[in-house]
Image (tube, rainbow, N blue to C red):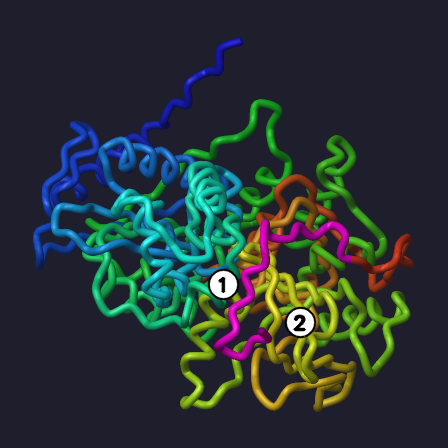
Amino acid sequence: MSVPALVFSDDQAEAHDRVAEMLRGVGVDIDAGALTPRAEGKEALLAITGKAGSGKTMLLSRLVGALEEAGVETVSGDYEGRRRRDRRTLAILAPTNKAASVLRTRGVPATTIHRIIYTPVYDPEYEKIAEWLTGEGERPQIEGLTEAALDRAHAFYQSVKSVPGALAAAGLRGSDFIKGWKRRDEPLDIGFVDEASMLDARQFDDLKELFPALVLFGDPAQLAPVNQSGAMVFDGLPEAQKLTLHRVHRQADDNPILDLAHALSDPDLGFEAFERMVEQAAARDDRVVVAPRVDSDLMARSPVLVWRNATRIRLIHAFRRAHGAPEDALLSGEPLICDGIELPLKHRRKRLDLEARGLIKGAQVIYLGPGRKPGFSRLHVIGAEDPQISAASIVKIELPEEEEPFIPFAANMGAAFLHGAAVTIHKAQGSQWEAVQVFAPDLWAAARAGRSEAGQPLWKRLAYVAITRAEKRLIWVTRYRLGRPARPLGTDDLVAPAAPLTLTPGGEEG
């Protein structure tokens, strides 16, 4: 059976040609497959925008393939070989672990912005293995490592281009070969950034410093970063540096979730009329569901998306009570959201270690259980390449109508967490789940408030972002009710890494 070739729409073809033209200007010809050494001082910047389903990810993927065929190397952030003037590199970036993970599931080797900005410092002995794996050195002889162990590392790297994963397959722990992390000083080469609507001005400036050639991919209908006055970083670019994909690419059997999202662009559409559209979609397609209550089992892995913090806190409290969670402890399997790293400046290296491992602000985490030391937690970082980690933790559980959160346990310093059974739609940007519950009473409240953002009713922007988080199923929850859980919380569904990659420095257990 032959598979039909993917064909660009006219606007995708134009965007492809514009990126190709930009890359030729910096010495990479993806049409001819020709490379020239990077010319210092040359800079290029382009933004490609489009709503959900307009083909941004397909275009990004095809461009990545064309760059690889031309001989451009993809760098992941876990190891980078010696810098050579004739070597051309590409980094595919996303603001969050989950957004990077969504791209990886589609065959695009993405990593987080943090993982690129903070680079690992390898033990010199094990750096020889990394150089060999990446084709920059001879097969090494390492005391304590057998030839069979090196063969396992090589076989792993052939299937998964991850140096830490390959070293783990050889039987090494992260604490053996990564001695710490440092902020990158030298610039890179070509950068593709997905979910660019989430970037704030500081991140954008950092990326422009690191990448002389930068292409942003973003959705202008999403919510702008908080404290950025409703503007996204690509809004301020000259028109000559912006391209918009207008055509919506639907599946062969149509996509009711995308249909609902794009219906929100109608300026005359009110909330009540939109909710009737949701009900009509649910009546003809089981990918849209109208539910009278929140599914508490689904909340353990896919948070309810809300607008108001008060709603978020009430739902979290109801979730914990439904699962019989004690007030002074977490149950294994409870979801958390990283609220930042609380470390003084003198512990900057510890912060870099944690952030480089994926524990960045907004990261979704599953609590596995207490660590071996008081105040430490064993955690699974959703979407991270090496997801299991043990870190000093400060867990805050907010209570309804209480100003101060309840803290069941806390280290003196470390990673801070809020509960993750419900999250605001702002924080959900960049993430996707197979099934998503959208709390409609909050969107109705936003509609009643009459607020606008960037010239559009706020409820429409909220609804658009919330709906497009759903990959396969949208659940539109209509009432303040929570269903009883059908099963206890657990962690059996979480996939562990091939071997432990526990880094001892940086606020983690050994």
Q: Is residue 498 magenta?
A: yes
Q: Quadrant of residue 301?
A: bottom right
Q: Earlier in the sequence, mark 1 or mark 2?
A: 1
Foreground pick, 101 / 398: 101
Residue 201 higher or lower than 305, as above or below: below
Give residue 213's position: percent from left, percent from top. Answer: 21, 52
Q: Is residue 298 left or right of residue 221?
A: right
Q: Is residue 82 left or right of residue 2?
A: left
Give residue 333's position: percent from left, percent from top. Answer: 76, 62
Label 2: which secondary element = loop
Foreground pick, 279 / 291: 291
Identified by mark 2, the residue type is Arg
* Mark 1 → mark 2, Cα distance in angstroms: 40 Å
**For the magenta stretch, what is the residue range?**
491-510
Q: Residue at x 16, y 40 (%)?
A: 28
Q: Is residue 100 left or right of residue 460?
A: left
Examine the rendering and report whether any part of residue 49 can be seen: yes
Q: Which residue is mark 1?
A: 174
Give residue 8's position: percent from left, percent from top. Answer: 36, 27
Identified by mark 1, the residue type is Gly
Examine the rendering and report whether any part of residue 462 can be seen: no
Please, what is the dominant secondary structure of the magenta stretch? loop
* Marks 1, 2: nearer the viewer: 1
Q: Residue at x 80, y 78 (%)?
A: 329
